[in-house]
Image (cartoon, helix red, strand yellow):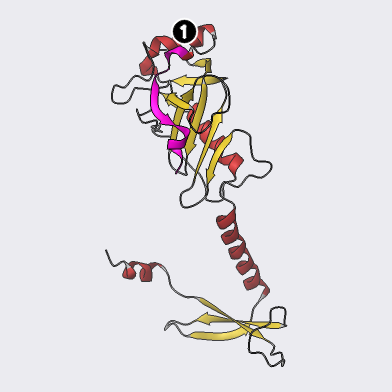
Amino acid sequence: MKNITHQLNDSYFPYKAILIYQRHEDDGKDIPRFGSPVYVESYDIGKNGNPINAHPLTIKEMSGLATLLQSSQELRTGYCIAEGILPAKVLHINTQGTGCVIWYTPPQEVSLFFAAALDMPSGKAHVPALVWKADKERLAVFALKGSQKPQLHTPLFHAPFFNIYEGGDVCMGTVAVDIKQSECLEDFITKWESYFWNSYFSHLIDNFTPVDGDIVLLWKQLVKTNEKFPVQVLKPTSTTIQDLLP
């Protein structure tokens, strides 16, 4: 264990103290009664750490305190909370710690971008159903056969794309991931999908090919012909949805 107390003292220092007075209710009880009239006094903190300049809490101070408390409440309750009805695509939500969300998308047509080094045209193509798992910093993607909403023991396949590790984690490269602690569920999902589809696919990782056959020829063909994705080329994993749960 490393003592970092000195670092905290260098970064944080007291500058304001608030004292709340409550009118005493003579009912024979020493327990404070919520709802009784109160008076709020504010103190500045002097150079030596002593409270000075006692004065009634000003409107400006009250406004600043309200903003601070509101921000704290949003950080506590806003992360990955749905703004409306829970989206049907969501499979699991965990808002604790860094949190994570697991969701799926059915087969769809998307725009794909390929780096010049692959010598293949960018364009629209059909992709298989996918299962996504993300927290504030990391994304993993897997593929599905069919279009039905997956269950706990639904087998997962390797996502048939470049820039993905064999274990499913996505290499985001130079993408500037910016997921805020107050991000609602809908925005969280939309951002991650946007980060993934709008980045450039550039290379295979550790020489692992996630499909049977030549992946470059596969995507050249799909972009050129607009055919449905041939799910028979997907490689199985040993992972299920249950394995993705925290």
Give left or right: position of 52 versus 87: left
Q: Quadrant of residue 219?
A: top left
Q: Is residue 24 visible?
A: yes
Residue 185 coordinates in the image, percent (x, y): 59, 43
Q: Which residue is mark 1?
A: 221
Residue drawn at x 59%, y 52% is 78
Amino acid type, mark 1: Gln
Label 1, residues with CA under 10 Å away: few <14, some 14-19, many ≥20: some
Residue 79 coordinates in the image, percent (x, y): 56, 49
Q: Is residue 176 visible?
A: no
Give left or right: position of 75 versus 13: right
Q: Is residue 238 above or below residue 139?
A: above
Q: Which residues are magenta?
A: 232-246
Q: Point out the image quarter for the N terminus.
A: bottom left
Queried whether the magenta region covers residue 134, the answer comes back as no
Q: Is residue 51 above or below residue 71?
A: below
Residue drawn at x 68%, y 41% is 85
Residue drawn at x 72%, y 83% is 37
Residue 3 coordinates in the image, percent (x, y): 28, 67
Residue 38 coordinates in the image, percent (x, y): 69, 82
Q: Nearer the viewer, residue 202 or 130?
A: 130
User: How many numbered marks have been drawn onto this rendered protein structure?
Assistant: 1
Q: Is residue 182 above or below residue 20?
A: above
Q: Is residue 34 above or below residue 112?
A: below
